[in-house]
């Protein structure tokens, strides 16, 4: 009742925490917590994080010089990570440390504790090319290996796994034979027809998963779709039927299926019992008041998934200036068969652009080879933007003499790369919160793709916009570039934008910088976000020679 609270563990210093996820676990591993209760609720697994080895950065608010800068622990690529240990902790506060080879496998990526078996840990090597699934003896803290994986590029992490089935079999997602499959025990239960994305629930009868079409089955008709499936030894059954993006949760015989489609705003939540709809959960979400005029397609020889959006009042005759609007990188699928995913792109289209969103190599949802193609070379993302654009222009009214690109975060990096490396294709760019020097981004993400700055300096130089020597491989002619960055960004710090601006200035390249005071990596203030869109349109029209009246 809120009385008699007592601490089971208390930090020994200001650099230590208990029961919380460290920065890279929350930001990059999909692990947002640091404690896990036993099924009987009589004890719990608790993470102890010591970020003493992590470098300290300072984030200031120049609009308020009277305030002290914020001191943050940021594990930049090639530098120290937090030390993470794990303890079985009783309600009396007594602790037993869980033992594994933390020197070789320092990353605690996933923890699972259910009534079906011993607690499971997924631990990774720092280079993420090897990992172990360990079972924990909660009485002694000893661990035993249940499964080991190795990959010459990297090993991905997936929602919902590893876990035990009710019968005590290991459930995992694995890359086998060029496909991403569901495996239960030693047996894969899916094949190349599906690209498994997450395990949603495991019952004694089946496993509920989300998946997109595998590389062999994917075609233009399947572009951007994600479905829910039931899988067991007898086969695969699709639960979601209409084309779209679907997710689900399940408890016992009841499943809640949440579905987004291109022709309906928001999401529809249905309650299924024994697989049959019984109720629809009312939605009170605001109607956006507009519907995207979007065509899902594929572009180029690599069949890059694309979305093409035209102004809603377009007559279909005159070629339009083009705005590429990608994210274009790992973990960020933008081409989706869902209405609300395209609202911002449609708003830009209504300002007089043909907007193209392309999900090139490195983006999720297609195949392991597609995602891992960018190993040691992020610039392939740009190659695919160019290929998709030029192929789509054969079938859509795109004016290739007026092409701009905008993006945020990885997409901001991609926009900056486009105008610096391919000014023959791109005539203007807007780089929002861009990573400009990959050595300034975090360990778990950056080292997975590029290695470390000390061991792989060429990969970092090729994939960065700036190096210690200035702009990285800029081409001529110079194109207009707007750089937008939140001064309070603690994920992609504003040093990225400032270093790019300094390098551009040193090279004599005019550009615009829009600093956002008090804004972090994403702009939460509604008025700021709205005005930022208007400023972007003004810049694009000025840069492409369009009327701004």
Image (spheres, helix red, strand yellow):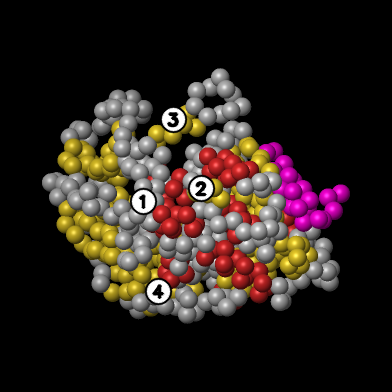
The quarter of the rendered structure image containing the N terminus is top left
The first of marks 4 and 2 along the sequence is 4
Give the mark toward the camera: 1 or 4: 1
| Mark 2 Cα shell of 10 Å, populated few (<14), some (14-19), many (≥20) | few
The residue wearing badge 4 is 179
Q: Which residue is mark 1?
A: 454
Q: Taking 76 as reference, is 305 above or below it?
A: below
Q: CA distance from mark 1 to mark 2?
A: 16 Å
Vertical placement of residue 269 versus 20, above or below = below
Q: Say if the magenta span includes residue 541.
A: yes
Q: 278 or 182, which is in the foreground?
A: 182
- Residue 229 seen in the current view: no
In this rendering, is residue 341 above or below 370? above
Q: Is residue 477 left or right of residue 140?
A: right
> Which is in the foreground here, disc 4 or disc 3?
3
Q: Are marks 2 and 3 in contact (CB under 8 Å)?
A: no
In the rendered structure, find residue 33 and report the number of the disc placed on it.
Answer: none
Q: Which numbered disc, 2 or 3, marks the residue that appears first in the sequence? A: 3
Quickly name the residue at label 2.
Answer: 469
Residue depth check, mark 2 versus mark 3: number of the one nearer the observer? 2
Residue 16 image offset from top left, x and y in percent: 30, 33
Q: Which mark is residue 71?
A: 3
The x and y percentages for residue 197 are 43, 64
Magenta-tinted stretch: 527-549
Where residue 19 sits, quadrant-wise, is: top left
């Amino acid at each position: 009742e809120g009385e008699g609270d007592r601490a089971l563990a208390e930090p020994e210093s200001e650099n230590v925490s208990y029961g919380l996820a460290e920065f890279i676990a929350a930001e990059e591993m999909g692990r947002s917590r640091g404690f896990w209760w036993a099924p009987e609720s009589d004890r719990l697994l608790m993470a102890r994080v010591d970020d003493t080895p992590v470098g300290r950065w300072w984030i200031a608010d120049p609009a308020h010089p009277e305030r002290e800068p914020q001191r943050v622990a940021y594990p930049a690529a090639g530098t120290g990570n937090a030390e993470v240990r794990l303890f079985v902790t009783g309600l009396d506060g007594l602790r037993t440390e869980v033992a594994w080879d933390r020197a070789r496998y320092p990353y605690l990526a996933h923890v699972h504790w259910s009534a079906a078996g011993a607690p499971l840990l997924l631990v990774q090597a720092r280079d993420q090319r090897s990992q172990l699934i360990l079972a924990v003896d909660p009485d002694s803290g000893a661990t035993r290996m249940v499964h080991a994986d190795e990959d010459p590029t990297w090993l991905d992490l997936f929602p919902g796994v590893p876990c035990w089935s009710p019968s005590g079999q290991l459930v995992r997602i694995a890359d086998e034979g060029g496909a991403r499959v569901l495996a239960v025990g030693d047996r894969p239960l899916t094949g190349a027809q599906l690209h498994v994305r997450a395990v949603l629930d495991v019952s004694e009868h089946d496993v509920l998963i989300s998946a997109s079409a595998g590389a062999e089955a994917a075609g233009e008709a399947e572009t951007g779709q994600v479905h829910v499936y039931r899988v067991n030894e007898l086969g695969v059954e699709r639960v979601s039927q209409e084309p779209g993006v679907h997710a689900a949760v399940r408890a016992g015989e009841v499943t809640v299926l949440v579905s987004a489609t291109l022709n309906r705003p928001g999401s529809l939540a249905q309650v299924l019992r024994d697989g049959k709809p019984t109720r629809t959960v009312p939605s009170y979400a605001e109607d956006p008041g507009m519907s995207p005029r979007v065509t899902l397609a594929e572009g180029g020889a690599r069949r890059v998934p694309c979305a093409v959006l035209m102004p809603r009042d377009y007559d279909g005759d005159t070629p339009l200036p083009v705005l590429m609007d990608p994210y274009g990188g790992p973990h960020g699928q933008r081409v989706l068969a869902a209405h609300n995913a395209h609202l911002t792109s449609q708003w830009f289209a209504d300002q007089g652009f043909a907007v193209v969103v392309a999900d090139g190599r490195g983006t999720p949802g297609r195949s392991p080879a597609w995602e891992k193609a960018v190993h040691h070379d992020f610039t392939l993302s740009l190659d695919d933007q160019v290929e998709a654009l030029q192929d789509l222009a054969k079938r859509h009214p795109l004016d290739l003499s007026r092409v701009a690109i905008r993006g945020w975060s990885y997409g901001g990096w991609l926009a900056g790369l486009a105008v610096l490396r391919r000014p023959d294709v791109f005539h203007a760019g807007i780089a929002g919160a861009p990573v400009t020097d990959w050595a300034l981004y975090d360990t778990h993400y950056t080292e997975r793709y590029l290695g470390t700055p000390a061991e792989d300096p060429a990969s970092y130089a090729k994939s960065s916009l700036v190096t210690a020597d200035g702009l990285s491989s800029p081409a001529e002619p110079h194109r207009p570039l707007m750089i937008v960055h939140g001064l309070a960004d603690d994920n992609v710090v504003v040093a990225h934008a400032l270093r790019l601006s300094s390098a551009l200035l040193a090279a004599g390249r005019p550009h615009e910088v829009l600093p956002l005071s008090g804004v972090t990596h994403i702009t939460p203030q509604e008025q700021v976000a709205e005005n930022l869109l208007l400023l972007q349109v003004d810049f694009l029209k000025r840069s492409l020679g369009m009327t701004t009246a």
